[in-house]
Amino acid sequence: MSTRKSEGQEEKWELRLYTAGQTPKSLAAVKNLRKVCEEHLAGRYEIEIVDLLKNPRLAKDHQIVAIPTLVRKLPVPIRKIIGDLSDTERALVGLQLKQLR
């Protein structure tokens, strides 16, 4: 099975954001993530939001030590970013959507 995309086919991004209820930081992370995705990945991303207050066991199972935490599942390699993603430059570099200068 080839992992290379054929011409014209864009890579799909799978992102999972771990939050803790409706805290200001969690709400900011959701808002900031949606903004970054719409500006840089329009039409080729999927966001799953996991509320650790509803299912705290997932924090241990998925090795989440701080919240909010964003996990880029696809494309590989897996990347984790901790914080509310308000620093757009840092978020883009963390997701590898932009190179460090």
Image (cartoon, rainbow, N blue to C red):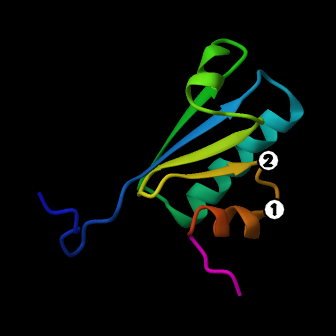
Majority SS type along the magenta span: loop
* Disc on res. 87: 1
Amino acid under disc 1: Asp
Amino acid under disc 2: Gly
- In the displayed structure, would residue 18 be above or below residue 71? above
Residue lying at 67% horizontally and 33% vertically, measured from the top left? 64
Q: CA distance from mark 2 to mark 1?
A: 9 Å
Count how many numbered circles sit on residues in the image. Answer: 2
x, y (%) of residue 4?
Answer: 22, 68
- Magenta stretch, residue numbers: 97-101
Secondary-structure class at tag 1? loop
Residue at the outermost right position: 24
Residue lying at 58% horizontally and 45% vertically, measured from the top left? 71
Residue at the outermost bottom position: 101
Question: Residue under circle 2?
Answer: 83
Secondary-structure class at tag 2? loop
Is residue 100 in the magenta section?
yes
